[in-house]
Image (tube, coloured by chain):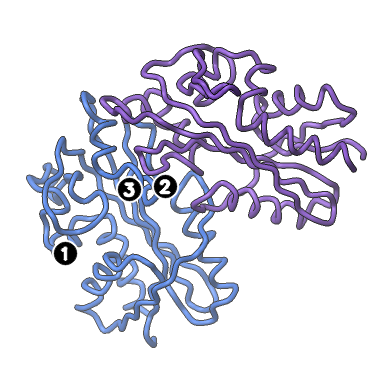
Chain colours: A blue, B purple
Amino acid sequence: MEELMFITSNSHKYEEFSHAIGKTEIMGKHYKMKYIEVQADTIDLVAMASATQIASYMSKPFVIEDSGISIDVLSGFPGPYSSFVFQTIGNQGILDLMRDKERRSASFRSVFILFDGIEFHKFTGESQGVLETTQKGDMGFGYDPIFVPYCRDGTLCDKTYAQLPIELKNELSHRGKSLEKLIEYLSKE
Amino acid sequence: MEELMFITSNSHKYEEFSHAIGKTEIMGKHYKMKYIEVQADTIDLVAMASATQIASYMSKPFVIEDSGISIDVLSGFPGPYSSFVFQTIGNQGILDLMRDKERRSASFRSVFILFDGIEFHKFTGESQGVLETTQKGDMGFGYDPIFVPYCRDGTLCDKTYAQLPIELKNELSHRGKSLEKLIEYLSKE
């Protein structure tokens, strides 16, 4: 396979992608572009709608990714609108909404859609965790400073995503998991 | 003009529309349907994208409406995602976000798009106001119980939207104002 374009306006996402494929023979390319997303209840639908739209004018293979965090006690908020919510109320807004809330569970979901030039393939990853009461760490992006994931051994980590360097975040994170599946698929091709 | 279809899945919006056209010769019809909306920074863009999409398969004239509330101190949140945010964190979530906030100004915006079978026409209305600290009233829908509009004389009302019967809400509200412009346009036809 030639260079695989990852179409995203988010440099942090590309960095995680780039780090993950670094150990493989896959060559990546950052195609920095915003595209129109639909409003839908799930990020899976949002991602698939975007991919089909982009494929209508992009003949080469590409991947896109959509991700979001869903907070259980807030009925899944901010979910598919995680990006907009982050840009407006930010992590402090989430902490304000979660003040006095005992149930602090949340999950991150990442959906990669690969368009191979003919068909679409979906690769998903989830990460369960809990929300911190304050922001911790300055790595990563978005909600990383308030999300504490579970480790692979099933115990809660003692760090937020933002306190983990990329290689450790990729081992645990929703995007790390979806990337692992994407890479496994591409390596078999 | 024959019956004008208002395409909306929201019965409250149709009720306000129906009330407003009640005094005119315009005949309305509720076409209860959900349609795909795009994610965009403004409700004007969301509404226009929806209208063009619906017009691609709907040959008859129709109107659609999109509206949202923007809270100044929250960078415009929830804006174009007002509906989703209401369904998840609700009015209590907004009140939690606004706890301890001194600057409580917000504005509602309503955008009607009329497709006359050939062209699109946009009618907008805005309503400035402030957010209450508790929910008051049980009329209306959505954010009505926490929004106190300014009256036409420029002073702050002593009631929330949810404490006003439809005819009074329509006199002051964002949707009342956009409806007024829509009706004025249709009456001249």
Q: Amino acid at mark 1?
A: Ile
Residue B4: where, in percent of width, then height? 84, 37
Closer-to-camera residue (A41/A38)? A38
The residue wearing badge 3 is: A86
Q: Is residue B66 visible?
A: yes
Residue A81's mark? Answer: 2
- In the figure, residue B173 lies in which quadrant? top right
Residue under the point 24% across and 35% down: A105
Judged from this view, the residue extending furthest toward the front is B153
Task: State the residue at coordinates (30%, 71%).
Answer: A184
Pointer 1 residue: A166
Q: Amino acid at mark 3?
A: Phe
Mark 2 near mark 1, Cβ–Cβ under 8 Å? Answer: no
The residue tagged with tag 1: helix, strand or loop?
helix
Q: Are marks 2 and 1 on the same chain?
A: yes
What residue is drawn where x is 44% and y is 65%?
A113
Label 2: which secondary element = helix
Q: Chain of mark 1?
A: A
The C terminus of chain A appears in which quarter of the rendering? bottom left
Q: How far across and down, in percent of the image, does residue B123 sit?
A: 70, 43
